[in-house]
Amino acid sequence: MIYDKKTGDVQIIDKSKGKKKPIIRSHDDLDRERNLIKKELAKDNTLAADEDWAVKKATLVESFIKKHNVDPSKF
């Protein structure tokens, strides 16, 4: 909620619109997220033999970057 002292207006902010994304602040956070991705990839053993392996890997990496708001050029 935002209150403007001059006008007396009150604005209510919808929290569902701006969900905070997790921020990776340390190597431990990065390792934890990498392990989650590895576990997700390990669930389906047939991916290594499939031709769409690169596509699946790219989508997982892309979703990780969007989810955690990570700048890929920093790695």
Image: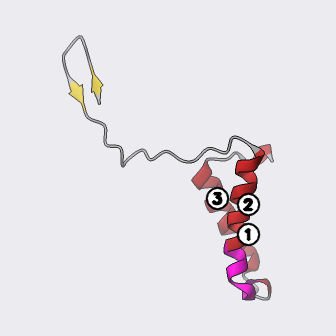
Name the spot of residue 26 as percent of width and height, x first.
73, 42
Q: Nearer the viewer, residue 58 or 20?
A: 20
> Which amino acid type corresponds to the residue marked 3 in the rendered image?
Phe
Mark 3 secondary-structure assignment: helix
Image height of 28 relative to 37, above or below = above
Q: Element at badge 2?
A: helix
Other residues around mark 1 within 10 Å, as few (<14) / some (14–19) / many (≥20): few
Q: Are marks 1 and 2 in contact (CB under 8 Å)?
A: yes
In the picture as drawn, the residue positioned furthest to the left comes out as: 8
Q: Say left or right for 33 vs 49.
A: left
Q: State yes or no: residue 45 in magenta.
A: yes
Q: Which is closer to the viewer, label 2 or label 3?
A: 2
The residue at 76%/55% (across/down) is: 31
Q: Which residue is mark 1?
A: 38
Q: Which quarter of the image is occupied by the N terminus?
A: top left
Identify residue type, mark 2.
Answer: Arg
Disc 2 from disc 3: Cα separation: 9 Å
Q: Main secondary structure of the magenta part?
A: helix
Front residue of 2/53: it is: 2
Q: Residue 43 location in percent, x, y? A: 68, 81
Residue holding disc 3 = 64
From the top left corner, tell me how far across and down residue 37 is, in percent. Answer: 69, 66
The numbered mark, 1 or 3, whose residue comes first in the sequence reads: 1
* First to last magenta residue range: 40-47
Q: Which mark is residue 34?
A: 2
* Residue 56 drawn above or below residue 6: below
State how far apart marks 1 and 2 are (Cα).
6 Å
Question: Magenta includes 26?
Answer: no
- Assess disc 2: are there few (<14), some (14-19) or many (≥20) residues with their C-alpha within 10 Å of its C-alpha: some
User: x%, y% of residue 21?
Assistant: 54, 47
Q: In the image, what residue occupies the spot 65% across and 54% down? A: 65
